[in-house]
Image: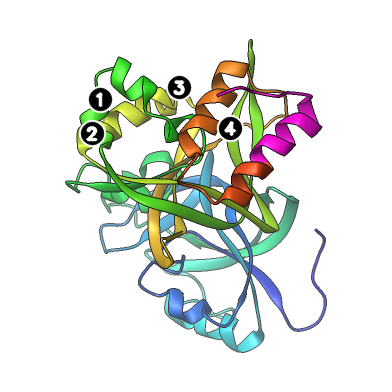
Amino acid sequence: MGALTGAKQRVFVYGSLRRGERYHLLLAESKVEALQAWTKGELIDTGWGYPGLMEGEDRVYGELYRVDEKTLARLDHLEGYQSDAPVKPGGYRRVWRRIYTDRGPVKAYVYLFEMPETHPFRKVMYGDWKARHLGQQKEWLYFAYGSCMDDERFHSQGVAEEFHDVLGRGVLRRHAMRYTLPYSDGGRADIVEQRGRRVEGKVYRTSPRGLDYLFWREGVHSGVYRPAWVPVVIEGKMVENVLTFIVIDKKKETAPPEHYAREILRGSEGVVSSAYHRRLRRRLKKKFGMVVEY
């Protein structure tokens, strides 16, 4: 994706302007280009109810929008930015940055935070402002789209009671399920942003203990998957900020091992739509030559 022409510009947002956050209404009429975007930097909690992006080499996650001049002016006003005035400590400056998406890198505006010299701050976990609630909630809605739709390992690993509350089918729009994480025995499931596609899965209500288990199983602390909060349609109702896990370092798709594909097919049957279940089986056969008994 290259530069835009005309009056509209791309803007990367990482805090209170994101979907499901306080000021997202300012972008309600703007076109979303990517929900799974990131840039290099360091994300800090200012302590004032919103984050700040500073220079750094970590990944900071957010969303990419295409906005018109009026919307850009409203964003400038929210952030206290004036192009003809110096930026004071505690303020924001709007700059061009490289933004990475599943479709490739683009240039977009982003608001960088000017940290006051004596202001205390803490780093936001996982470079995602939505992660600020971790450790504060008593329960979480979790969207499983891969092997965690199956409960066999929940039972064998002693956590089945943390995943007994199944809300039903979840649908994540604008994404596709792919096997982008190569292990020695084959690929593991991931979601990739793709217009016109959808991922179906199983939605659980789980506990802090269940959350700890998922972080261990998904290799979050080893940098394999990252937690992400996505908009999911649950039994026909849109619910914002549902927890899921996304591969950080995506590679070319590789065939999953048969035992893993079996978990996906077995766990999803009767929850996802019959059409989606057929699509899972058909893609395994067409893409990898796999016919899996489950």
Residue annotated with mark 1: 159
Q: Which of the 4 image quadrants contains residue 282?
A: top right
Residue 175 image offset from top left, x and y in percent: 62, 52
Q: Residue at x 70, y 29 (%)?
A: 251
Residue annotated with mark 4: 189
The structure's colour scheme is rainbow
Q: Quadrant of the C terminus?
A: top right
What SS does tag 3 mark? helix
The kind of residue tagged 2 is Glu
Question: Distance between the Cα atoms at labels 2 and 4?
Answer: 22 Å
The kind of residue tagged 1 is Val
Question: Distance between the Cα atoms at labels 1 and 3?
Answer: 21 Å
Q: Which mark is residue 222?
A: 3
Mark toward the start of the polypeptide (2 vs 4): 2
| Range shown magenta | 280-294
Q: Residues within 10 Å of mark 1 (few under 14, many from 20)?
A: some
